[in-house]
Amino acid sequence: PLESSSSSSSSSSSSCRSNVHATVGRDGVLVVAPDPLVPFSRSAFVQRQRFDLDANASLLLVDWFGAGRVNNGERWDFDLLSSRCDLFHSDDNVPFLIESLSMDNRRQGQADSVQTSSMDPFCFAVSSDATFDAFASVILHGPAMEEVSGRFEELSRSLASEHTRIRDVGRHHLDETAAGQLMQHDLHLGGRVLLGFSQVRPYGRADDDGDNDNESDGSTYVARIAGTSNEDMYRILHSCLRPLKDDFGIEFYKDRIHGSTSHKPIVITGANADKASARTGIESQNETPRSSHLPATDKSSPLDGHASWCALMLADSGLPTGSFAHSAGIESATQLGLFGNPSNVDQERVDRYINAAARSSVQLLVPFVTAGNALARTQHRSSDGIDLDEMFHQWQKLDRFAHAALAANSPGCKASLDQGHGMLRVAIQWLGASSNGTGSKEMGASSIAMELAQRIQVEIDRSSDSTGHIGPVFGFVCGFLGLDEKATCRILGYCTARDMISAAVRLNLVGPMAGVNLLDGAYKAVEEGIESSSVYNNEEEDDVVSAAMEAVATCCPVVEAVHPTHDVLALRLFRT
């Protein structure tokens, strides 16, 4: 570990940057286990990490952030915090895993920007019994990390079992001694901890049980942890990394643990409370507005004629895409008790979670939707001499990137595939009917779209339904229907928020009438997600894809830690 916590401080006009590019050779083992980065108030930090992994290579990466100088009233009060890690197989130029987070507070300084959706836009205060002041993403890859992965998985199940019934779906089976060390009371944690654990599903291969046939390259896992204090995080990491002691001769993070138990998280009161961040909902009204260096965007997206009709059809809840089978983590959050007792649900926290989840989901998907839409519309405008092989290649590239970005959240990845397949089935029927006419340029474009959709369906069937994510598919379909990027993103954002609120109604968290107000308010969160990941591109295909991939990121760590626990719930109403 590093000798001390890293800090990030900068003026609002610049950012602190960190870039790491490492290669792990055959049978090599690399452990990156730093202390948390602590962002100061008004700081901006951008981190990019890339790891190229040879056969049988092993990697453990801890990417960890604290809330800031909490004792001084700074809680998640940065301007920008952006961290991304890409994992590549050494013989491939497309990553098989993208773990990316970007939380941007600078838009609060834009007078012409949409108003913030919540006093807690990144959802750190969603729990009824905790405010989360630490978040870590732990990436584990290769044969040397199997036992460590087992500990993280067992701890995830143990923490969830404190609040709800879980089922026996563990991939790793620890002995009683190791399992006992991972119980919450044995770790002596001081506050609430959320831990979501997922195995990365290989692209293009059906794998419902999460196994990958013991490939020589080893399995890849991601643990996302949200805690109320860095001290609790130290205890968790120390316990889970114990199997590495024999190989490295040290116990990682052991020297960071002081005392027999973690202290309870500090509750800020008095004068310091006035300086606390808006991310906890207690920002001072006298706070100086944040400066912003982001371009103002044109929110207008005029639609008329058939394009307007298509937009209404796409937004219709009756469109048979199967999206209502997914709760976007709301069912997990409910069973984990984040909204309080089922008989006395905290409506404000439900609202906060839905807004945060909608914003994060839209921010992640918009780059793929935008790129797919732009590629389809470019081909639509130059329909003479279209290279279908190149279009299919571009879709495959986008879909691989989409899978890499979603793979760390197993339920979210499955939901994306399910909805992509449903959208494609609808598109084949829709575009097929449109292409029956002859003689017009529009009909010619529909025929091309139909042929491309059929080729994508063949690829999905070949891979046993393990390809075809909603982002690229939705973007391509909307592009061929004549909808521009902004309209396409807004339709997807509306459908995302609508489905989340529908899930909340079915879970009896809100009533149908209250859901109307929630859906109206979710507009702001969706707009923030779109604005935060807007991709400004030209007509060159390579530029479109490259720009989109640079913008890929989620923005709500607590939501990302909650969602994967859906796979261990014993009783579930929703598929994901």
Image: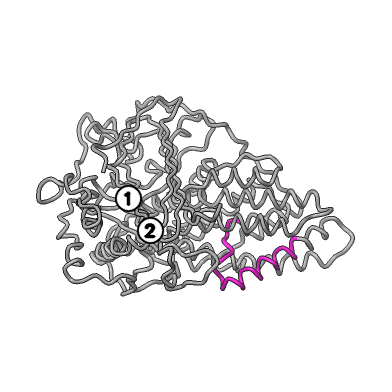
**Dot 1, how many residues are within 10 Å of its Cα: few (below 14), some (14-19), or many (20+)?**
some
Task: Tell me which amino acid carries mark 1.
Answer: Val
Question: Disc 2 designates what residue?
Answer: 27
Residue 20 percent location from the top left of the image: 42, 41
In the rendered image, residue 485, in percent from the top left (x then y), is placed at: 65, 47
Judge by depth and name the residue closer to the eye, 223 or 353: 223
Most extreme residue toward the left, as rendered? Answer: 260
Q: Nearer the viewer, mark 2 or mark 1?
A: 2
Quadrant for the C terminus, please: bottom left
Where residue 31 is drawn, which disc sits there? 1
- Using the image as rendered, state which of residue 565 and residue 520 is in the foreground: 565
Residue 192 lies in the magenta stretch: no
Judge left or right: residue 387 versus residue 560. Answer: right
Task: Provide the secondary structure element on which disc 1 rests.
Answer: strand
User: Can residue 32 be seen?
Assistant: yes
Bounds of the magenta span? 449-473
